[in-house]
Amino acid sequence: MTAPKLDPDEHPWVQRILPPILHDLAATCAVPFEIRDVKVELRAMAMEVSFAVCAPLGSETHVTFLGTGKPPQDIADLADKMQDVATDALWFEGLSKVWPECPEHPESHALRPTVAAERPVWRCPLTRKVIAEIGSLPGRMAQSGNA
Ligand SMILES: [Zn+2]
């Protein structure tokens, strides 16, 4: 009862860290997610955001993310967390895909979120090449596969 509740719509930290990840999910993940019940709390040395991630088949995952309040690192860390959620949801829906798929090595591995040159980025784990800034993955023909 001590931490003040903040309205996420008025909170710049959440407005900074959440949209890039939601953009990349919407652009490239085969499962369309809906985000609900966003809550932000100020901790002593940290910021906490929690929300529910709802997938079409009714699976709902509650995500709680404790960040530093520093956007580049927090965006990468939150992307890491959402990667787990997205991977679970893809598996649940029978789509044995990785998210986000490495464009240079299709059908192989997911990109890894990290911070490079103070930007939150997706990087190929194999070549360590930066593929895109988090929040700027281009929409692809993610669902067309190679049929
Ligand atoms: Zn790769």
Image (cartoon, rainbow, N blue to C red):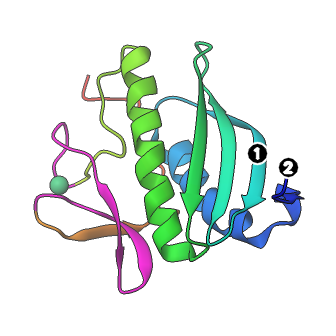
Of residues 16 and 47, the one nearer the viewer is 47
User: Is 111 part of what is drawn in magenta?
Assistant: yes
Q: Earlier in the sequence, mark 2 or mark 1?
A: 2
Residue 5 lies, with reference to residue 47, above or below; the image says: above
Of residues 74 and 107, the one nearer the viewer is 74
Q: Which mark is residue 1?
A: 2
Mark 1, Cα crowd under 10 Å, few <14 / some 14-19 / many 20+, is: some
User: Is 118 part of what is drawn in magenta?
Assistant: yes
Q: Amino acid at mark 2?
A: Met
The residue depicted at 59 percent of the width and 39 percent of the height is 63
Specify the quarter for ligand 1. Answer: bottom left
Residue closest to the far front: 2
Q: How many marks?
A: 2
Mark 1 vs ligand 1: CB below 8 Å: no
Q: Amino acid at mark 1?
A: Val
* Region in magenta: 104-126
The residues bearing labels 2 and 1 have C-alpha atoms spaced at a distance of: 18 Å
Tell me which corner region of the image, top left, top right, bottom left or bottom right, holds residue 14. Answer: bottom right
Residue 142 lies, with reference to residue 68, above or below; the image says: above
Give the residue number, with chain letter if any, for mark 1: 38
Residue closest to the far bottom: 117
Q: Is residue 111 left or right of residue 29?
A: left
Q: Position of residue 138 (x, y in %)?
A: 46, 57
Q: Secondary structure at mark 1?
A: strand
Q: Which mark is residue 63?
A: none
Q: Position of residue 81 (x, y in %)?
A: 45, 47
Mark 2 vs ligand 1: CB below 8 Å: no
Q: Position of residue 140 (x, y in %)?
A: 42, 46
Quadrant showing the C terminus: top left
Q: Position of residue 120 (x, y in %)?
A: 44, 72
